[in-house]
Image (cartoon, rainbow, N blue to C red):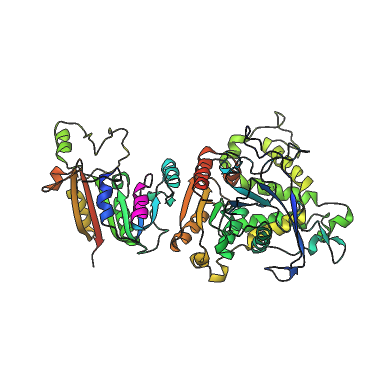
Amino acid sequence: MDTTTNSVGAVQPQRAHFDKPLALAGGGALPAFELVYETYGELNAARSNAVLVCHALSGNHHVAGHYADDPKNVGWWDNLVGPGKPLDTRKFFVVGVNNLGGCYGSTGPTTINPASGRPWGADFPVVVVEDWVAAQAMLADRLGIDTWAAVMGGSLGGMQALQWTLEYPERIRHALVIASAPKLTAQNIAFNEVARQAILSDPDFHGGHYYAHGVVPARGLRLARMIGHITYLSDDQMAEKFGRKLRQGDLQFSYDVDFEIESYLRYQGDKFAGYFDANTYLITTKALDYFDPARDYGGNLAAALARARADFLVVSFSTDWRFAPERSREIVYGLVHNRLDVSYAEIESIAGHDSFLLDDPRYHAVMRAYFEGIET
Amino acid sequence: MTNVLGRFDFDVIAKWIRPGEKVLDLGCGDGSLLRYLRDEKGVLGYGVDNDPDNVLACIRNGVNVLQIDLEAGLSGFEDGFFDHVVMSLSLQTVRHTERLLAEMLRVGREAVVSFPNFGHRSHREAIAQGRMPVSESLPYQWYNSPNVRFFTMADFEALCAEHGILLRERLGFDGEAAVGEDLNLNASIAVYRLGKAG
């Protein structure tokens, strides 16, 4: 452990295989599956210091540290997790896991379907937040973790933290729900649908079985990512970061890149299309759209939250319009209704939805203070 | 009187709250009142504050705090959910006084408010000499005060009468000493326990 840089240092992904079938919320079951995960810090003797970090749309199990053979591959929440950081790995045992349906090694569309001997592709079932949490619980069993000190996540990850409190109320003491929502709005679903249509209409998609054709629907994935990026930033931040700055100093009078923002979106889109799987993107956006714990309670969120027993920290960001503060407040008021301990911080930030991944001092101070208050 | 919390009005407020109650503390600062009520009376408390430093202080204090703008009202809270809604030395910092008082008594069975009494002798003397008062209870200059409403106990009671708000109990303090008579002249801090008529 390298404490001079506050990094957990070089880490190694691990793999857990499960032969017990996992019944899925959408019907059917996965007969067997694997989860790729990483851990940082030490599980204490009482097994009371474990924290699960749930990833969002494009995240994975690599939460913190780097790989010895790839030092530039730093975990996606490394600024928050490490020795001396807000989620302090000297106190907590931290687990990051790639969710089912992912494309980083856990069972998903790119892995081999034992029934056919070929990649699952479009045949991989649409797994949802409830399924991810059920699989995470099986991983917790495997790691000897009966109760999480905390489950934390941002955005779609926050939905998983919330779902933990409903599905396994006795197995989670604290939930940190960051830049999240109790369900997506129509506008939010609409953005996901445009992203999906970009992928589904790409000629290289081949009904989701593009692996067999030796291609990937890169154009669709690229567009999907570009749309996503627009919604993750705020108007103010885009204005500040890019404004109307020109790439080459002059208008081109062509359909090539004129403005810096175009260049940025193309770069982000290309980069993403180079490593992310389109089927995983489709599944994950559906998981976002479907998440709605109040659905079985006639839309009454407070009634849905009645099962929860955990203490909560809910955090939102002032310029996040994709997961707006109002949505976080819905969760907060639902928790108050159920007399649960909850604190809510609304962080002033220019960076929109992306704020939750940045290291704003006020935001991190809140996270640090909350984790410091968690007994292990 | 004893001053266990560092804020003498807290002692009065704490006496009015029974064990196990649900309490909402508006403008809760660093959460010390709620912490005291939780530790000593097993109260389920939530603080509301819109200052990020106070939100952080509450979290450090292990107290529930919700970062909400009081000017936006209490619309997220349910009718009658709380036994007591407390507003300690903050009422004068809120613009929509009438609406907030109504909201406090909507979400709470009783409201407890304390505020600096503009009618105190020293404040009247300052005005008589042509200057805005600056005192222990009104420690700010006119140009840097967080206070946006300046009112006396008599003003406040008139407003309550107009809105059918019952004055269940009323106390006045000067410094930390309880004031016996002519509160509007002698009290620098007023503390009220309020209820709904009917």
| B67 and A169: which is toward the camera | A169
Residue that extends furthest to the front in the rendered view of this protein: A45
Q: Is residue B77 left or right of residue A283?
A: left
Tell me what residue is drawn at x 45 percent, y 56 percent.
A341
Q: Is residue A239 visible?
A: yes
Q: Is residue A305 left or right of residue A291?
A: left
Task: Based on the picture, tell me whether residue B37 belongs to the magenta stretch.
Answer: yes
Residue B58 rendering spot, x and y as whole percentages: 42, 46
Residue A66 rendering spot, x and y as whole percentages: 71, 40
Residue B83 rendering spot, x and y as whole percentages: 32, 61
Q: Which quadrant would the N terminus of chain A be assigned to in this image?
A: top right
Tell me what residue is drawn at x 24 percent, y 39 percent.
B137
Residue that extends furthest to the top in the rendered view of this protein: A249
Q: Is residue A243 visible?
A: no
* Residue B87 in the image: above or below residue A350: below
| A259 and A60: which is toward the camera | A60
Q: Is residue B198 left or right of residue A60?
A: left
Quadrant of residue A337 within the rendered picture: bottom left
| A185 and A291: which is toward the camera | A291
Quadrant of residue A183 within the rendered picture: bottom right
Q: Is residue A206 left or right of residue A153?
A: right
Residue A137 rendering spot, x and y as whole percentages: 65, 61
> Which residues make up the magenta segment?
B25-40
Tell me what residue is drawn at x 47 percent, y 55 percent.
A342
Task: Based on the picture, tell me whether residue A320 belongs to the magenta stretch.
Answer: no
Quadrant of residue A255 within the rendered picture: top right
